[in-house]
Amino acid sequence: MERSVAGLHGQELVLSNLSPSVAQRRFALGVVLVLLVVFVIVAGPLSGLPLRRVDAFIPAYGTAIFVIDSITAALLFAQFSVVRSYALLALANGYFLTALIAIPWTLTFPGVLAPEGGLGGGLQSTVWLYVLSHLGFALFAIVYTLLKDADPMEWVSPRSIRAWVLTTVGLVTALVCCATVFVTAGHALLPRIMLDTAEVSYLWYYVIGPMAALFVVALVLLWLRHRSVLDLWLMLVLFAYIVEIALTAFPIPYRFSIGWYAGRIYGVLSGSFVLLILMKEVTMLYGELLRAVLAQRREREVRLLTGDAVAATVAHEIKQPLSAMIMNASTGLRWLDRATPNIDEAKAALQGIVSSGHRADAVIENIRTLFKRDARTRTSLDVNNLIREALDLVRDDLQKYRVAVQTDYNPSLPPIEGNQVQLQQVLVNLITNAIDSMATEDGDRILSLRSKVYDPVNLLVSVEDVGKGVEPSAVDLIFKPQFTTKVHGMGMGLSICRSIIEAHGGRLWVTANLPQGAIFQFTLPVHREH
Ligand code: ADP
């Protein structure tokens, strides 16, 4: 938890900085294999097989690309505004470019708005727009790769961040507008790539070849420099792009052939990878941050509560020995003030002062250990070990009051993350209370300690005694500071136990042990791998 809170200040929790886990790498590899298998099946002789022309396919495909890529771009722009890395700005613009080009691409596709392409330009315009979108994306991906390890921008105001976003978005929009005008109104000036829906000119291979090569360069570069989750998924996107180009270009790029349809689907897939992963990771990170912030707030509250409680307890507990000292001192003085001072009585009074002093000292020491925050750091802990250590600490008391201990540990409990000193303190407090409650009762004295899995994310520890039990009316009161039914009790133990358990993300409560006694139980979240 400390780690996540630290992440709030550093930028470890930003996607472009998080390193991928083994599971994420494996998943990415799995996706690559699936893409390859499908490619092998679809490519080959099947690829050129013409399928029925589905008129709704193109607008649906264009819209999907537009929506997916523009949302991805928006998320990446948002990441850029947090991390202020030029690399993210470039990548966001890459997605923005492909999103934007999807509009004229769809509108110029023959048969969507008009048989010869809506904006004029016919067959050629869609091909050139396709090339521009792919080349642009590959170039932006390369810029991303080259810049991603550079230092972020110096601190700049949110306004300059906005200016960067607006300027680059403006430039990309202008580029797409110019390109659209050029490939539609000026299409006659462009070399002809597509002769008809089933035939391409030799130029096609001179264009598609370098384009594919550029993606390979981008992929290799990123492979050499990859570090973060985002890099991993971007590699996947580049890979899907390469497969898509291969399907579109070879062996013969018939429109509405199996290979062509498959290429389009790969196109949508490559857009979706980063988006889905961005959404998933952003949501998970949000959850994690929320947990961290809540834990931090709870910890602060606990600290305030314990601060108040310390003050109250010190005042309450020290008052008594202090009054005793004052009383003893005046008595001693009176014995000495006599015509014949009574040394023995004076000595006894002084003795009283010494023992009151010791008591005050012990009280303070007690409070200090209760509130000790020496090791705020949390480590991975085995709950069963914690219970064994706590039992060791109270061994003398267990013997003194002849308490039999029964244990029932689940040996395969996952570890928890916590503060060893504090959790031991909780167990020692609960066990001591159980011993106290049984010490006043006749009959067998049995202390039972259990550990088990509570639910998929929590463990449960219970401390059971057969003592006098807790009155139903006192169930809530006993957790309040300074509530005690013991002559020398401080009434702080359970309130501190609850604070500690809650600060660890768990819960502590009491139930009746039938036929007799009390069961104190607490949960602790299992240690999650980050
Ligand atoms: P203290 O032990 O100093 O009284 P605690 O906060 O630990 O302070 O406990 C508060 C009160 O809760 C105790 O005085 C006692 O009345 C009740 N209590 C705690 N544990 C038990 C138990 N195992 N059985 C019965 N009563 C208990």
Image: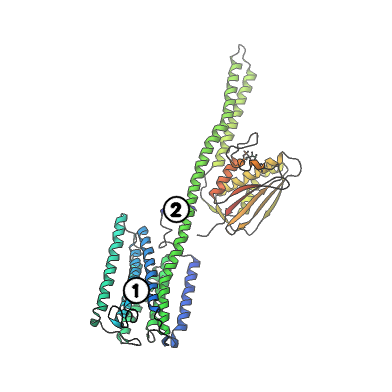
Residue drawn at x 62%, y 41% is 478
Q: Is residue 141 above or below residue 199?
A: above
Residue for badge 2 = 6
Helix or strand or loop: what does disc 1 sit on?
Answer: helix
Which amino acid does the dot numbered 2 rest on? Answer: Ala
Q: Residue 174: percent from the left, percent from the top?
A: 26, 69
**Location of residue 504 with respect to 436 vertically, above or below:** below
Q: Position of residue 259 (x, y in %)?
A: 42, 83
Q: Is mark 2 within 8 Å of ligand 1?
A: no
How many numbered marks have been drawn onto this rendered protein structure? 2
| Mark 1 → mark 2, Cα distance in angstroms | 41 Å
In the figure, residue 257 lies in which quadrant?
Answer: bottom left
Q: Residue at x 28, y 78 (%)?
A: 119
**Residue closest to the eye, 47 or 318:** 47
Q: Name the residue that disc number 1 marks.
A: 102
Task: Examine the rendering and report whether any part of residue 454 can be seen.
Answer: yes
* Direction from residue 336 to residue 160 in the image, left or right: left
Q: Is residue 239 visible?
A: no
Q: Residue furthest right?
A: 443
Using the rendered view, name the quadrant where residue 281 is placed. bottom left
The colour scheme applied to this rendered structure is rainbow
- In the rendered image, residue 43, in percent from the top left (x then y), is placed at 44, 84
Task: Residue 9: give its label.
Answer: none
